[in-house]
Image (spheres, rainbow, N blue to C red):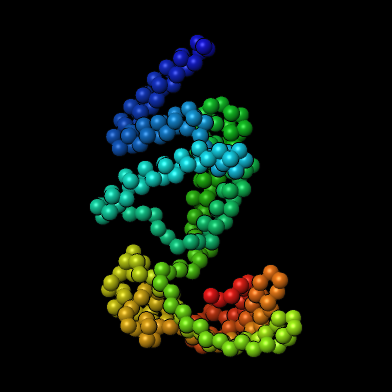
Amino acid sequence: MNAALPTFALYAALGAIVAWLVVTWLVGLRQGFLFVVGIGLGAVLAGVSFGFTTGWRAWIRDRDPTGFLAQFLAIALAMVVSIPLIATHEELSGAIAPLSVSLLIGAFVFGAAMQVADGCGSGTLYKAGLGNGFSLAVLPGFVFGSFLGAAHLDAWLALGSLPLGGNLQIINNNEIEFPIFRKVGISGVVFYDMGNAYNLEDRYCSGLQRKNSSISIKFDPCFRMPESLTAGLRKSVGFGFRWFSPIGPLRFEWGIPLDKQPGEDPLVFEFTIGNFF
């Protein structure tokens, strides 16, 4: 056994204790506790050579699901602890926000960079801590990119969010389909549709907002009974063509909204594969 390893471990432990004392003295007991949690996670990741991308890579390349399943176990354990705390403490809440353009761009850049760097944040940190030269070179870029993104956060958020969906959808579809070129399976269609999508969650729609919203009922994402059913359904008419091709029905359709909002197109084209139902 290499005698240098116990010596290194001893010095590392002493250094961690000194660092914990300094952090606790300068910042407080809570931050000191978080420092201990971070040190423990780092030691575990380094000890088992575990990174989040490593588990997925091993599952895809080697058909070894061990690391992949370990991630789900870690998520489950975190949920067992965090969900009761969030449910019983009003000062705690989840980080909930609509899907934004900046998030999509950041996710793509992060995923591409993980492939180049051969590791995610945790993988880069534990390999850098073990002295891996490539990870040591990547780590400053990882840190600089995080600070750069935070410095330009307002500009990224200004790109806007994608439309917020709902958990209740009401659809009424009325159409007449007629043959045009029967031999090749091409037909025409005219339609009249009604529908809308709503959200029932209080974190987006409070009870007061459901009753007294100043937004038009047709554009209010909060479901209000019975107004959302009697006056809140949006309507459109349109026409299109369908080809029953060898790969399935191909639908080419143009819709005209009858209650268009400002900024919406007066004519909307949609291409879909498959039947409506």
Closer-to-camera residue (267/91): 267
Q: Position of residue 1 (x, y in %)?
A: 52, 11
Closer-to-camera residue (73/19): 73
As drawn, 239 above or below 38: below
Tell me what residue is drawn at x 35 percent, y 36 percent. Answer: 34
As drawn, 238 above or below 136: below
On the picture, is 231 further left or further right than 265? left
Tell me what residue is drawn at x 66 percent, y 80 percent. Answer: 242
Q: Residue furthest front?
A: 183
Q: Position of residue 275 (x, y in %)?
A: 59, 75
Tell me what residue is drawn at x 54 percent, y 61 percent. Answer: 101
Closer-to-camera residue (242/43): 242
Could one spot residue 119 in this view of the protein?
no
Q: Position of residue 168 (x, y in %)?
A: 40, 72
Q: Can you tell which quarter of the image residue 249 is in?
A: bottom right
Q: Can you tell which quarter of the image residue 170 is in?
A: bottom left
Q: Residue furthest right?
A: 183
Q: Position of residue 246 (x, y in %)?
A: 71, 71
